[in-house]
């Protein structure tokens, strides 16, 4: 299960299937080994609802944004594509989540 915060400010939950949770864990493990493509793969999974992952455009944008910030060119194009289907508020939430994830990673390294 992945716990996410809804854009309305309340606590929201998105229950992932076992396959979805395994996909997310595998991608994050691959990223920990240095694979930027794994972050892009998370964006693809969330944007398409593939590999058991529940479709969530905010999470898709977040992962594409993180991958793009690390130099993944195709992720930047995909981030732009999913942005076309999102409200300004949803994009803002995705950007906030990306910043939060990146800052949490920096704290773990320090």
Image (cartoon, rainbow, N blue to C red):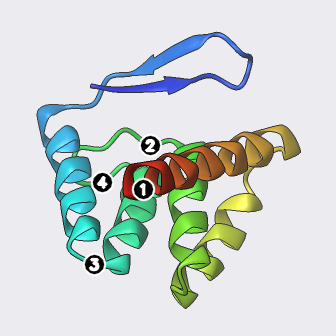
User: Cα distance, mark 3 to mark 1?
Assistant: 24 Å
Q: Hey, which quadrant is residue 61 in on the image?
A: bottom right
User: Cα distance, mark 3 to mark 4?
Assistant: 23 Å
Question: Which of the marked residues, 2 or 3, is nearer the chain's N terminus?
Answer: 3
Give SS at disc 3.
loop
Question: Which of the marked residues, 3 or 4, is nearer the chain's N terminus?
Answer: 3
Above or below 14: residue 103: below
Give SS at disc 1.
helix
Identify the residue at horizontal 64%, vertical 81% (top origin). Answer: 77
Q: Residue furthest front?
A: 110
Q: Which residue is mark 4?
A: 50
* In front: label 3 or label 1: 3
Q: Which residue is mark 1?
A: 48
Q: Nearer the viewer, residue 15 or 107?
A: 107
Question: Where in the figure is residue 27, as x and y percent of width and height?
Answer: 25, 61
Q: Which residue is mark 2?
A: 55
Q: Are marks 1 and 2 in contact (CB under 8 Å)?
A: yes
Q: Which residue is mark 3?
A: 34
Question: Where in the figure is residue 85, as x and y percent of width and height?
Answer: 73, 54
Identify the residue at horizontal 25%, vertical 66% (top origin). Answer: 32
Question: Which of the marked residues, 2 or 4, is nearer the chain's N terminus?
Answer: 4
Is residue 90 shown left or right of residue 44?
Answer: right
Question: Which of the marked residues, 1 or 2, is nearer the chain's N terminus?
Answer: 1
Is residue 88 shown left or right of residue 35?
Answer: right
Q: Are marks 4 and 1 in contact (CB under 8 Å)?
A: yes
């Amino acid at each position: 299960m992945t716990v996410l915060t809804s854009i309305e400010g309340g606590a929201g939950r998105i229950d992932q299937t076992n396959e979805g949770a395994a996909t997310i864990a595998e991608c994050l493990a691959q990223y920990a080994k240095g694979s930027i493509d794994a972050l892009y793969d998370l964006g693809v999974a969330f944007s398409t609802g593939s590999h058991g992952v529940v479709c969530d455009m905010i999470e898709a944008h977040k992962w594409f944004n993180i991958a793009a910030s690390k130099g993944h060119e195709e992720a930047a194009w995909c981030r732009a594509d999913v942005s076309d289907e999102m409200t300004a508020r949803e994009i803002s939430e995705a950007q906030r989540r990306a910043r939060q994830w990146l800052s949490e990673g920096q704290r773990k390294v320090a």
